[in-house]
Amino acid sequence: MVVRQRRPNTPETPLYTRADVERLSVERREPEWLHHSRLAAWELYEEIPMPSLKEEEWRRTDYRHIRWNEASPLVAQNGAGLDVVPQYNLEPLIGSEKGGLMVFVDSKLVHADIPETLRRQGVIFTDLQTACREHEALVRPNLMTKAVRPGDGKFAALHAAMWTHGVFVYVPRHKAVDIPLHVVMYNTHPGATLGHVLVVVEENAQATMLVDYASSDVQSQSSYIGATELLVDEAANLRFVELQDWNRETFEFSHKRALVGREGNLDWVVGTMGGKLVKAFIEVDLIGQGAAGRVSGMFFADKGQLFDHDTQQNHNAPLTRSDLLFKGAAKDRARTVWQGMIKSLPKMQKIDGFQANRNLLLSEDARMDGIPGLEIEADDVRCTHAATFGTLEDVPVFYLMSRGITRKDAELMVIQGFFDELLERIPFEGVRARLHDALEAKIVG
């Protein structure tokens, strides 16, 4: 009798142990508080089971084909430097003026440019390892204690125990950072990286920031297990853009959460283009009266990519406003999932919540799912949601062709027009141009 195995005999969980956590912390000579924090997260990680298709948050995303024997080993320091990073990832964000720039290659900080104007304002823009040693009073109370927490899930706990690199941004109260802050996380080798972004914008301060995630092509599978924490205090303002273009062998599991205080404002743009599989939890908690949050997402999946964005807008104070728009396209045999939820606590009156998901199907074999949701426990609110699906319409294409434009260029223009609303929300002209090129590459194939 022949017994067939439905799946390869590969590990079903990441290949880490408590000893790996100990070694990581000791080798980096971390402060005692961080060492204990990692170990506590590891204990929690061991208690939490791996996500399964039986859970609502995961039932549409099967990640079990990841080969953890390839994707678990931490990417080794291999001498790669700034020269391996594509030039367009390093270009100034506004004209020729350079802002703060920090570049990580294979988890190692290879470049840090912090203008003196930022230092004079008391702004901290540094790597997370340094911040944990030199700015404990600012980092310790905020690192995975308020926004993303180890208990948020299996991968959140793993990240808290094993994060490899990260950036810390601190803007003191009443300070406005006029020049943008730019972070690049670039990988050249397969394996695992666990990056962290922690941004603290104090009362009546403001900042603009871009984080680029990218990697070169490799043959083996990789994993990125990340976390982003945005803490926006009373009357503060943060514009935050993150763009991802991993190679086609990377699996991403990430938790991202923002807390917005009284009369604070967050404008958050998320772009997803790369990766083999992406599972991203994106959450905005409006915790102070009058807080506002806008989240704009764009994604384009092709070939066999699977993107799953799970968003949540929590109205935890009255008179709060949230506005979420995710637009995406899929072609070939790709699949995308967006599931969103607007929640309000009891007695959180006069809130205004909106969410919409617009999907463009570009082939018969692609599949796109949009699942909006509301969980409202107050009675004086305005909350709406919608998910729409469409294909490339013939009328605008034929109209452009009647003006002498080829079919290929006409289709390209219509699809780019579909995304223009989101591209215009990105505050950097050069980045918008780069995304236009990325969209064109996806469309043309």
Image (cartoon, rainbow, N blue to C red):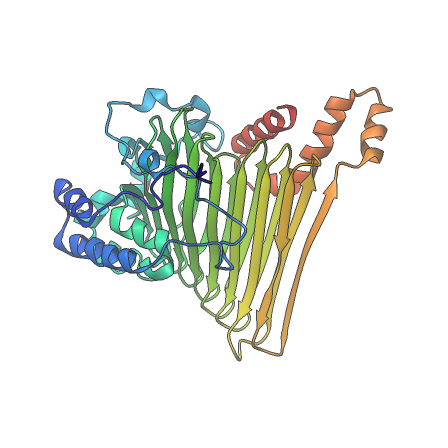
Compared across the picture, whether 254 is left or right of 32 comes to right
Compared across the picture, whether 15 is left or right of 59 comes to left
Q: Nearer the viewer, residue 179 or 65?
A: 65
Q: Quick one: quadrant of the N terminus?
A: top left
- Picture coordinates of residue 219, whole percent (x, y): 40, 24
Residue 441 seen in the current view: yes
Q: Nearer the viewer, residue 382 or 63?
A: 63
Q: Residue placed at 28% from the left, 23% from the top?
A: 80
Q: Residue placed at 24% from the left, 54% from the top?
A: 42
Q: Residue placed at 60% from the left, 48% from the top?
A: 326
- Picture coordinates of residue 383, whole percent (x, y): 64, 67
Compared across the picture, whether 31 is left or right of 138 comes to left
Q: Nearer the viewer, residue 192 or 209?
A: 192
- Picture coordinates of residue 279, whole percent (x, y): 47, 47
Q: Is residue 289 above or below residue 312?
A: below
Q: Quick one: quadrant of the C terminus?
A: top right
Q: Quadrant of residue 66?
A: top left
Q: Quadrant of residue 405?
A: top right
Residue 239 seen in the current view: no
Compared across the picture, whether 180 is left or right of 108 comes to right
Number of disc labels: 0
- Picture coordinates of residue 79, whole percent (x, y): 24, 23
Q: Nearer the viewer, residue 257 or 153?
A: 153
Q: Residue placed at 59% from the left, 74% from the top?
A: 350
| Residue located farthest toward the front when viewing the structure as drawn | 1
